[in-house]
Image (spheres, rainbow, N blue to C red):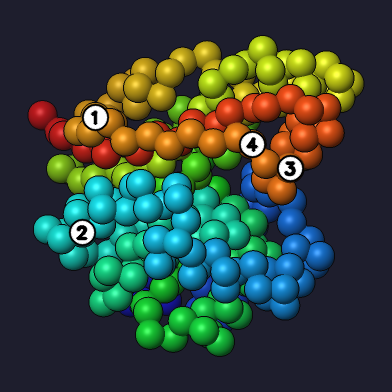
């Protein structure tokens, strides 16, 4: 762990492995297993996702890359990536243009973080990528620690529905420095009736995480953020490879459209 980043933690981890901090929050993240690890490391999923994001060889990332990286042209301090997932969020995109910037990349799933460490050790030694496993709803970090925090559907994927999203956003606001940036690409569903139809045919209740009671703008405002920019968006069909819902939608022949929005948010303290 980078010494400067190590000083930003406000509590001791339950476990330290290869210098990375683990806070045993696996029940608050995706439930990956060794089958996933094989896909990530042996079947090349990590390698391909990193390549696509770092080279903008991905239609979604190519839409947002310029706006995201522009923030780092004027701020060169370390950043925090929350809920990185198997694609490591926006980190590959950012480091491809700013390889000298240290970062702390986090996810609730310890198995995912340990797998990323192995991949980094074997493939990405030129970067200062620090890892930690913790929940975005209870970050073990001091107040006002980072100038920039990034999320690629990290808040969208938060457990516990709307309450979990508000809790996560409040934590991001707490950990962000005054005048800091929260760069978030979050998604929303464009046709809830289509989603409900799939769940009805599937014979399962709609997931809590999909029941949005407030818009993203309302959630951001509730947690204290000022929206500096929100013009960029990208829309695509949910694929069967995305998740169980995508698989069911494909089986029933129902199109579910997913919209991704880029929000550049600021923490202005009066």
Give the label on residue 172, or none.
Answer: none
Q: Distance from label 4 to label 3 (Cα)?
A: 7 Å
| Residue 106 x, y percent position in the rendering | 49, 58
Question: Is 186 placed above or below 142 here?
Answer: above
**Residue at (30% x, 22% y) in the render:** 221
The residue singled out by tag 4 in the image is 238
Precedes in sequence: disc 2 or disc 4: 2
Q: Report whether 190 appears left or right of 195.
A: left
Precedes in sequence: disc 2 or disc 3: 2
The residue singled out by tag 1 in the image is 227
Q: Secondary structure at mark 1?
A: strand
Q: Distance from label 1 to label 3 (Cα)?
A: 33 Å
Question: Is 76 placed above or below 250 here?
Answer: below
Question: Is 5 placed above or below 228 here?
Answer: below
Q: Secondary structure at mark 4?
A: loop
Q: Please identify, in this view, whether the residue under mark 2 or under mark 3 is nearer the observer.
A: 3
Q: Please identify, in this view, whether the residue under mark 2 or under mark 4 is nearer the observer.
A: 4
**Residue at (54% x, 36% y) in the render:** 236
The residue singled out by tag 2 in the image is 72
Q: Residues within 10 Å of mark 4 (few under 14, many from 20)?
A: many
Q: Secondary structure at mark 3?
A: loop
The residue singled out by tag 3 in the image is 240
Q: Please identify, in this view, whether the residue under mark 1 or under mark 3 is nearer the observer.
A: 3
Q: Considering the image in quadrants, where does the N terminus appear? A: bottom left
In-front residue for pair 43/125: 43
Q: Report whether 82 appears left or right of 2.
A: right
């Amino acid at each position: 762990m980078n010494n400067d980043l190590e000083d930003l933690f406000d509590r001791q981890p339950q476990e330290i492995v290869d210098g990375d901090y683990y806070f045993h929050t696996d029940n608050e993240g995706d439930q990956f297993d060794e089958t996933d690890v094989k896909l990530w490391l042996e079947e090349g999923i990590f390698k391909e996702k990193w390549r696509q994001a770092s080279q903008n060889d991905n239609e979604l990332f190519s839409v947002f890359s310029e706006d995201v990286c522009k923030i780092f042209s004027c701020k060169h301090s370390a950043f925090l990536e929350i809920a990185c997932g198997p694609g490591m969020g926006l980190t590959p995109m950012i480091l491809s243009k700013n390889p000298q910037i240290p970062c702390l990349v986090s996810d609730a799933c310890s198995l995912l973080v340990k797998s990323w460490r192995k991949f980094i050790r074997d493939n990405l030694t030129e970067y200062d990528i620090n890892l930690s496993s913790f929940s975005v709803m209870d970050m073990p970090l001091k107040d006002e620690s980072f100038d920039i925090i990034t999320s690629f559907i990290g808040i969208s994927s938060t457990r516990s529905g709307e309450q979990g999203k508000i809790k996560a956003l409040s934590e991001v606001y707490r950990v962000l420095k005054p005048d800091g940036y929260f760069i978030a690409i979050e998604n929303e569903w464009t046709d809830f009736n289509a989603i409900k139809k799939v769940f009805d045919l599937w014979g399962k209740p709609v997931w809590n995480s999909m029941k949005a009671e407030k818009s993203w703008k309302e959630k951001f405002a509730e947690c204290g953020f000022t929206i500096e920019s929100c013009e960029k968006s990208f829309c695509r069909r949910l694929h069967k490879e995305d998740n169980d819902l995508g698989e069911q939608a494909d089986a029933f022949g129902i199109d579910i459209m997913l919209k991704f929005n880029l929000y550049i948010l600021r923490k202005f303290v009066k």
